[in-house]
Image (tube, grey):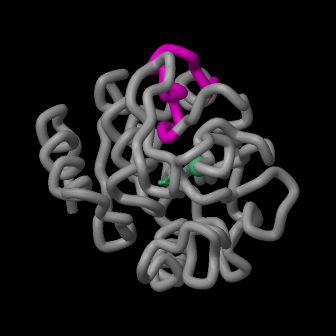
Amino acid sequence: MTQALIVIDLQNDFCPGGALAVPGGDDIVPGINALMEDFDAVVLTQDWHPGDHSSFASQHADKAPMEMTNMPYGPQVLWPDHCVQGSEGAVFHPELNTDRADQVLRKGFRRAIDSYSAFFENDQKTPTGLEGYLRTRGIGKLTMVGLATDFCVNFSAVDAAKLGFDVTVRTDLCRAIDLDGSLAAAMAGMREVGVSLN
Ligand code: VGL
Ligand code: ZN
């Protein structure tokens, strides 16, 4: 079966020094570059928000980063401004081997909807198109790595498993935000839908 490595959001803003830095986010880059050798296909995802994105706390009066709000599609964490389209923070980590990528999938570009998952936006029904890309290439087995374990990796892995892909998350090549128990919840949620956690 054709296998793809899906590298989630390895961008400057999620690495130390970035706007939404994930602790140790850059430590995983060499291991991910090495792992690319083992795959038929490599897909990179890129968080790609307009400057006035509704997931930014700065767009909500009286809200601070990491607080919750209610969106028409459900509860949403409010983040510091990050991965703004065309900004340095949205660029991939400089050491990531982007040359090896067959496909770069941008997500979170609609102002009104966040998109943690590489497959569906946070309304859980607007597709990004990645499912079609993978299926039309005959790819059935996915390995996921990147940032952050408990948000974009988690949502991508759960959606992929629900869509019927065989999914492994290499947790040693992921790093977490871990907000109010989100990492433990993510691990349990991924296990529940049959994601292999290695
Ligand atoms: C992410 C929060 C906001 C992620 C993206 O890549 O996990 N987290 N946007
Ligand atoms: Zn984002």
Is residue 115 left or right of 52 when viewed as pictured? left
Q: Residue 118: horizontal and vertical position, in percent?
A: 53, 38
Kindly indicate the quadrant of the structure image that contains residue 113.
top right
**Residue 124 is one of the magenta-drawn residues:** yes
Residue 56 visible to the viewer? yes
Q: Residue 75: horizontal and vertical position, in percent?
A: 39, 30
- Pick whichever, 49 or 147, lies toward us: 49
Image quadrant in which the C terminus is located: bottom left
Residue 149 against residue 17 in the figure, above or below: above
- Judged by its main secondary structure, the magenta piece is loop
Residue 71 against residue 115 in the figure, above or below: above
Image quadrant in which the N terminus is located: top left
Q: Report the label total.
A: 0
- Pick whichever, 114 or 10, lies toward us: 114
Is residue 60 left or right of 77 when viewed as pictured? right
Residue under the image location 48 percent in, 76 percent down:
25
- Pick whichever, 31 or 2, lies toward us: 31
Q: Residue 112: horizontal and vertical position, in percent?
A: 66, 26
Residue under the image location 31 percent in, 55 percent down:
169
Residue under the image location 73 percent in, 36 percent down:
109
Q: Residue furthest front?
A: 62
Residue 137 visible to the viewer? no
Q: Residue 196: horizontal and vertical position, in percent?
A: 20, 49
Extent of the magenta region? 116-129
**Residue 5 is one of the magenta-drawn residues:** no
Residue 148 against residue 77 in the figure, above or below: below
